[in-house]
Image (cartoon, helix red, strand yellow):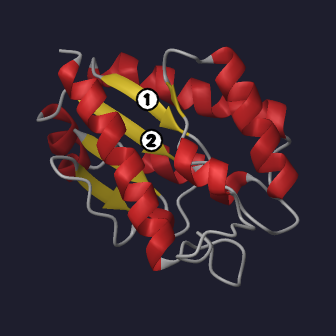
Amino acid sequence: MLIVGDSLLQGIQANPATIVAKKGLTISKARQLFQRKTVQTQIFRTGVVILHVGTNDLCRFKPQLLARLLIQLRKDLMKTTGKLVYLSALLPRKDEWRSNARETNKILRRLGRDFFLLHRRLHKKGPESSDPKGGVLCPDGLHLTEYGREEFAASLKGHAGRLIGAF
């Protein structure tokens, strides 16, 4: 399994998955990334790809368009690789793009029940968590705390196990 996404994936361990994390990854940069030979080789070796992209596009597109662009990226990648591709939910946040992330997730969930992966533990705890271990977000409201990374990794591992077990 290959998980490709933005800097929120940095430091995440989700064995047996291979993670490719690129700072500032947008939908258009993801398209370019998938053209690289090394990434194509990694995709070729896997049966499933999870995309965690869209966070860096929240300020560029309204939720409806962002959801459509993510779905199109998924379809295009499936067409060119022949692999199963899933979309990872945008993570909760505490900045001015919070409502756009939430709305984009709602649209994706409605349109893509069979390929949309929600990280329930992160979304349940939310950005204003009262969990004794601390919140899932750093004070910047965007990046994950160590505890947030642990929760995200656990969610990805759970999805990976379910998806791999489906074959």
Residue with the most extreme bottom position:
139
Residue at (45, 56) in percent of width and height: 152
Along the line of sight, which residue is nearer the eye, 32 or 157? 157
Q: Evaluate whether residue 32 shows in this view.
A: yes
Rendered position, 165 above or below 136: above
Residue with the most extreme front position:
132
The count of marks equals: 2
Q: Relative to residue 88, is residue 156 drawn left or right?
A: left
**Element under disc 1:** strand
What is the distance, in whole Å, between disc 2 and disc 1 at their CAs?
6 Å
Q: Give the label on residue 51, or none.
A: 2
User: In the image, residue 45 lies at what x, y percent?
Assistant: 11, 35
Residue at (39, 65) in percent of width and height: 150
Q: Give the label on residue 86, or none.
A: 1
Along the line of sight, which residue is nearer the eye, 22 or 100? 100
Along the line of sight, which residue is nearer the eye, 120 or 164? 120
Task: Give the amino acid at mark 1.
Answer: Tyr
Q: Relative to residue 22, is residue 57 drawn left or right?
A: right
| Mark 2 Cα-neighbour bin, 10 Å: few <14, some 14–19, many ≥20 | many
Q: Relative to residue 36, is residue 42 drawn left or right?
A: left
Which of pointers 2 and 1 lies earlier in the amino acid sequence?
A: 2
Rendered position, 39 above or below 46: below
Q: Evaluate whether residue 91 shows in this view.
A: no
Residue at (53, 44) in percent of width and height: 119
| Mark 1 Cα-neighbour bin, 10 Å: few <14, some 14–19, many ≥20 | many
State yes or no: discs 2 and 1 in contact (Cβ < 8 Å): yes
* The quadrant where residue 22 appears: bottom left
User: In the image, residue 116 lies at what x, y percent?
Assistant: 53, 27
Rendered position, 129 above or below 42: below
User: In the image, residue 19 lies at what x, y percent?
Assistant: 28, 55
Task: Give the amino acid at mark 2.
Answer: Leu
Locate the N terminus and report the quarter of the image it occupies. top left
